[in-house]
Image: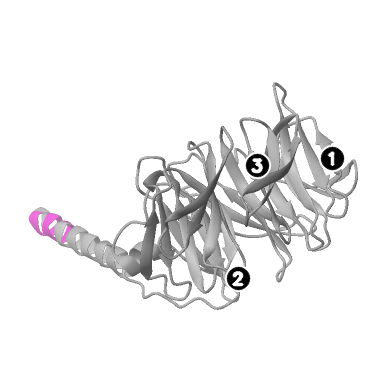
Amino acid sequence: MYWISMYSLRVFSLLLLLFLFSCKEEEKQKPFVTPSSSSLLVLNEGNFGWNNASIGIYTWQDSLYQADIFKKQNARPLGDVLQSAVLYNGELFLIVNNSSAIEVVSPINFKHKRTLQGISSPRYMLPMPGTSNAWITDIYADKVFKIDLLTGAKLDSIFVKGWNEQICSWAENEFIFSNLLKNCLYFFDPNTAIIKDSIVLDGEPRYLQKTTLGDLFFVVNQSNASGSTIYKLEKSTKEKISQFQSSTRIAQMCVGANGELYFVSDNKLFKSTEIGLASFLADLPPSSTIYAMYYDLKNQQILISNAGNFVQKGKIYFYDTSGTLKRTIEAEIIPNGFLPLD
């Protein structure tokens, strides 16, 4: 009887292992579901040097998250450190920093179209409307480059020493990029590559956010201090206004539908609607490592990414505008950005 029971136990254990293995295989082979126009791209940075950057798709209607879409659709990893992404002229540009590459894919099926190379450490990209060109920042080159989006060829450049980071539009013929070494914002003409103006700040300008009216918000982490300041740069006057000062570092910020600010400081979510004033909305889950924030205009929700311990899968928190946590989903390694696919 003992032999029979042990034999039965071994058979049961073997069947259980086969069942679990088949479940995992089935999970890996889930068919790709074409995203709707209201879907959201989740950028997962991955670990530096691990070649595990990835993208995921979140669909609002059914709260479905599809993981590692690029790898599933192209049978290879995306690359090393996904920094940012841009949707332009019906193509999706994935800026993969440590791979020195820009992967161009279809935003419908995410199949590879071409790879642009030649920028050593690309960070952020801004297309020039109505053209097949774009400006792109680089962390080490001491330059901002104008490139051809079809070939990747360098067409022009602006020399500014140091860490050139985010880039955004300002006026019809004026772009802005930030430099984290010089604590400066530079205004330049994208057609002539001439710097027209600059603003020196008291710390690193981060998290540049445009409003629907064209004003620019950004966070300055004060040099040699633990505090931060949110500034507003008015479109009409280019006047820099101190919107809110925090005694602790502001980890991330996003702008709401009506120009209100949502930001995270000391693991808490705040909302600011008036200069110098902010209201507490919610405590974030303990030990959160906040890496990105995004305000979804259609669904009026604030998305906050938690990179956790940087090795396990990160999480995305969905809050409504009153600070109520609506849902949590598991993303991939170090989720660091969001991009609507409409």
Q: Main secondary structure of the magenta part?
A: helix
Front residue (pair 250, 105)? 105
Q: Residue furthest left?
A: 3
Question: Could you tell which of marks 3 and 1 lies nearer the N-terminus?
Answer: 3
Q: Are marks 3 and 1 in contact (CB under 8 Å)?
A: no
At x 70% / y 40%, what residue is drawn? Answer: 185
Front residue (pair 140, 25)? 140
| Image quadrant in which the N terminus is located | bottom left
Tag 2: residue type? Gly
Badge 1, how many Cα within 10 Å: few under 14, some, many 20+? some
Say which residue label 2 marks: 130
**Left of 342 or right of it: where is 155?**
left
Q: Residue furthest top?
A: 224
Badge 3, how many Cα within 10 Å: few under 14, some, many 20+? many
**Left of 314 or right of it: where is 326?**
right
| Image quadrant in which the C terminus is located | bottom right
Residue 174 appears in the picture as rendered: yes
Q: CA distance from mark 3 to mark 1?
A: 20 Å
Say which residue label 1 marks: 244
Say which residue label 3 marks: 178
Q: Are marks 1 and 2 in contact (CB under 8 Å)?
A: no
Question: Could you tell which of marks 1 and 2 lies nearer the N-terminus?
Answer: 2
Can you say whether 317 is above or below 150 in the image? above
At x 49% / y 70%, what residue is drawn? Answer: 91
Image location of residue 239, percent across then percent down: 86, 44
User: In the image, which is nearer the foreground, mark 2 or mark 3?
Assistant: 2
Which segment did they paint magenta?
Answer: 3-9
